[in-house]
Each structure stands twice: as structure tokens, then as C-alpha cells.
Image (spheres, grey):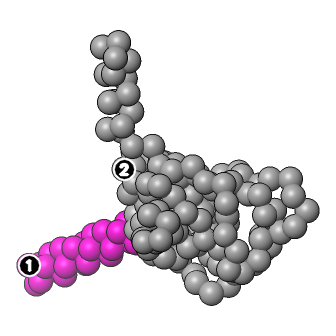
């Protein structure tokens, strides 16, 4: 009888551990916060997107305002085209808004940060952000430092 009780207790403990691991995986992958279709889509072109992924956050002043919805390569411009959906609550972004790719956290998750400009016109569904700053590539930075150190 006590053996059966111990087996049931261990089974419940293992089930709770697996549920906790599942919840941790959902939190790390940001799947729990993904909701599509409740905003407008804009796109921006970058020379290098680094490790940016679909569903990466789009922030403004540190507040999440949207998510990356698609990443493609534009063969005519030779650049990466990043489409992202911005929540309908933030429909007053000026047309001269700047988009930059930054890295956050210890795991190096990349996200897009928006800085609003001063134009009176606002971005609409399908518009492009013209002012972008690509991801910082560590190898390029190290190469520049080494070149400066050697004096070439």
C-alpha cells in the first residue's frame, strides 16, 4: 500500500516537472504572447539582420508594440526585407520613424527598436520605414579594432 502511494507521488512530481519545463519553453520562445492580425503591417530593409527571427519583438521606448511577421531577401535591392505587424493601438507612428536591430538578454535575442520621428504623416498598412540601422556584427567590429590596432 505504501509502495503504491510513493509511486503515485513520484508520478505527480514528474508530471509537474514536465509541465514546468513546457511552460519555461513557451516563455523562452515567446509563443505565449504571439497574437497576429490585430494591427497593421509595415516593412523595412536592412543590410544585415544578424540573428533576427520571425516573431521577434518590435519595441518602442522599451514597450512591445508588435512582432516580426516575415523575413525575406529582396533580390532587386540586395537587402533583407523585414515585415512586422504593429498593434492597432500604436497607429500614430510618423513616416520618418527609424528602425534598428538590437540584441537583448544573455541569450542574444534580437529585436527591432523603433524611434519615432517628427513628421505629421503617419505610417499606414503596407508602408515602408526608410531609415534603418542593421544589426551589429561582432566579427566586423573585431576586424575594425584589429585594423586600427595594426595602424593600417
First reached walking from the N terminus: tag 1 or tag 2: 1
Is any part of residue 41 visible from this angle? yes
C-alpha gap between disc 1 and disc 2? 43 Å
Which residue is rendered at x = 19% and y = 79% of the image? 11
Judging depth in this view, the residue of 48 and 28 nearest the camera is 48
* Helix, strand or loop status at disc 1: helix
**Residue at numbered disc 1:** 3
Q: Is residue 144 above or below residue 136?
A: above
Whether the magenta-drawn stretch holds residue 15 is answered as yes
Instruction: Please report the bounds of the magenta region as a residue range.
Output: 1-27
Q: Position of residue 71 (x, y in %)?
A: 45, 72
Between disc 1 and disc 2, the foreground one is 2
Which residue is rendered at x = 12% and y = 83% of the image? 4
The quadrant in which the N terminus is found is bottom left
- What kind of secondary structure does the magenta stretch mostly adopt? helix
Residue 107, numbered circle:
2
Amino acid at each position: 500500500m505504501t509502495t503504491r502511494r510513493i509511486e503515485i507521488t513520484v508520478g505527480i512530481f514528474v508530471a509537474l516537472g514536465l509541465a514546468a519545463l513546457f511552460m519555461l519553453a513557451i516563455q523562452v520562445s515567446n509563443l505565449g504572447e504571439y497574437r497576429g492580425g490585430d494591427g497593421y503591417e509595415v516593412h523595412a530593409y536592412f543590410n544585415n539582420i544578424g540573428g533576427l527571427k520571425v516573431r521577434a519583438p518590435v519595441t518602442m521606448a522599451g514597450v512591445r508594440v508588435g512582432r516580426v511577421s516575415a523575413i525575406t531577401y529582396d533580390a532587386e535591392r540586395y537587402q533583407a526585407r523585414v515585415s512586422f505587424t504593429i498593434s492597432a493601438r500604436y497607429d500614430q507612428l510618423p513616416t520618418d520613424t527609424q528602425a534598428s536591430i538590437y540584441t537583448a538578454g544573455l541569450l542574444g535575442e534580437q529585436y527591432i527598436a523603433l524611434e519615432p520621428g517628427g513628421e505629421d504623416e503617419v505610417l499606414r498598412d503596407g508602408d515602408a520605414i526608410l531609415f534603418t540601422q542593421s544589426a551589429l556584427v561582432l566579427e566586423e567590429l573585431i576586424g575594425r579594432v584589429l585594423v586600427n590596432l595594426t595602424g593600417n
